[in-house]
Amino acid sequence: MDPELNRYILLNEGKGLVPGYPQSTLDILGKSNIAAMALFIAFKQIMETESSSSYEAFKAEFDKLMMGSLSLPINIPGTNYYGGFMVYYQRCYLILLPFLFDDRGFWGSPDRCIIGLGGLQASTPRPKTYPIYMGGLVLARGGWAQGRKRVLRILREIIEKRRDSLMKHDDILDYLLKDEDSKYKLNDDEILDQVIMILYSGFETISTTSMMAIKYLHDHPTALQELRDEHFAIRGRKKPEEPIEWNDYKTMSFYACCKQIDKLCSIPPSKNGYLKPSILMQVTFETLRLATVVNGVLRKTTEEMELNGFVIPRGWRIYVYTREINYNPFLYPEPLKFNPWRWLDKSMESQNYCFLFGGGSRLCPGKELGIVIISTFLHYFVTQYRWEEVGGEKILKFPRVEAPNGLHVRVSKYQD
Ligand code: HEM
């Protein structure tokens, strides 16, 4: 691992401390550390050299753009939208299936609904009324508003400088700019779209999941201890300051290195070795399940279809609300409980109801990268620090997972 990133991951010491709290207190999400870390990592992967000179200016504009991308499309000065951007303009039909509301009118009671690409499960109680409501949900658009304009300007300048320079870089932007194979050559607009897409997609997903993992581990000392054992075992094979690398990551993922796993796990080791998820993977998947960051996936019907009595016309855009699957008690007993060990069975992740990263041909292409970044962060965090919450830890789960005031923790150096 790049030592600079490594340092950043080690909590960006001295930066982003929450005013009013002692020096050792960090705002884990919100406007500082984890979110900044996720964006910085993505920025550095895309433009290694420019990450030191252009990052701060870029980040300021990107923050505005992020805010605008999740707002009503009112394109007048003063609104979040005007200061940001929207991705595409498409009319989208929001399908509110009545089973998303239970008898008390609550959203998605865990025991009543499941919708997946395979259809509704037989256990779903059928509503008598016609199930589909149409709402004009405008997802996006309207010219390039301010945030995006400025972000694009910064990126274009970087691209121009790259073209004028003879230096070679080993980063994503260099690969995008290469014109060796004209079959895959992208024009500048397409390159810019790719860059923004990578920055945008990995930002909130990674930072929110990392924050929630810290929260759950804090609240579940047994899981934290098991994770620490697993990661001190990895550190034990390395010199004190030696960064982790790819081979370490492999032992951090599906090769169990914690004895306790064998006690808990009913599955025999596979012939390839102990191909069982490590406690790190279990914690990550359980966090992704319980604190669902991406609530659903968008699809379009290419022909009229019937899903267990629900008729969906051809050409409709559908928001498949996958979040509820994660709380289905038939699939995940005691669904609201943080139980990382339920992921001991590796096959859980490949079940066709598991939509943590979407599914089918649109499966999240950043899945592995996202898991690597979260894993690396947790590895350093749990082996180097203890932490306790110090107020402001209000967490909202709906409509999106967030800590409106940040999750404040006081960290101290970990000593046995
Ligand atoms: C914890 C981390 C992440 C989670 C939970 C996550 C989740 C998801 C989900 C649920 C989808 C929808 C897939 C579908 O429609 O079936 C998606 C799509 C996507 N994700 Fe991620 N993602 C994560 C990280 C990343 C990262 C790091 C990147 C890029 C570097 C990325 C890039 C994308 C892109 C480009 C799509 C659209 C794919 C398409 O429509 O073909 N994601 N992600």
Image (cartoon, rainbow, N blue to C red):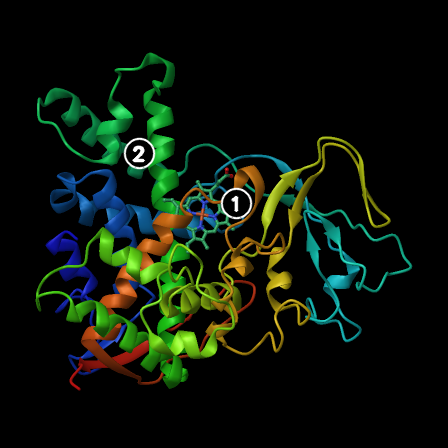
Residue 406 visible to the viewer: no
Q: Which mark is residue 74?
A: 1
How crowded is the residue under tag 1: few (<14 C-alpha within 10 Å), some, or many (20+)? some
How much space separates mark 1 and mark 2, taking CA atoms?
Answer: 21 Å
Res. 158 image quadrant: top left
**Is 339 on the left-hand or right-hand side of 320?**
left
Position above or below: 217 against 275: below
Which residue, given by chain and number where applicable, does mark 2 sit on? 152
Is 22 located above or below residue 66 in the figure?
below
Pick whichever, 208 or 145, lies toward us: 208
Q: Earlier in the sequence, mark 1 or mark 2?
A: 1
Q: Position of residue 386 (x, y in %)?
A: 24, 81
* Mark 2: amino acid: Leu
* SS at mark 2 in the image: helix
Give the quadrant of residue 167. Answer: top left
**Label 1 secondary element:** loop
Point out the residue furthest to the top here. 182
Q: Which residue type carries mark 1?
A: Ile
- The residue lying at 33 percent from left, 13 percent from top is 182
Q: Is residue 303 visible?
A: yes
The C terminus sits in image quarter: bottom left
Residue in view at x 47 percent, y 63 percent: 288
Q: Is residue 70 left or right of residue 178?
A: right
**Residue drawn at x 31%, y 62% as measured from the top left:** 252
Q: Is residue 123 above or below residue 163?
A: below
Which label is found at residue 4? none
Q: Is mark 2 within 8 Å of ligand 1?
A: no
Please state the horizontal and vertical placement of residue 117, each as a whole percent of the image: 68, 47
Determine crowd level at label 2: few under 14, some 14-19, many 20+ residues with C-alpha closer than 10 A: many
* Outermost right residue: 128
Residues 280 and 203: in front is 280
Where is residue 366 drawn, in percent x and y?
40, 45
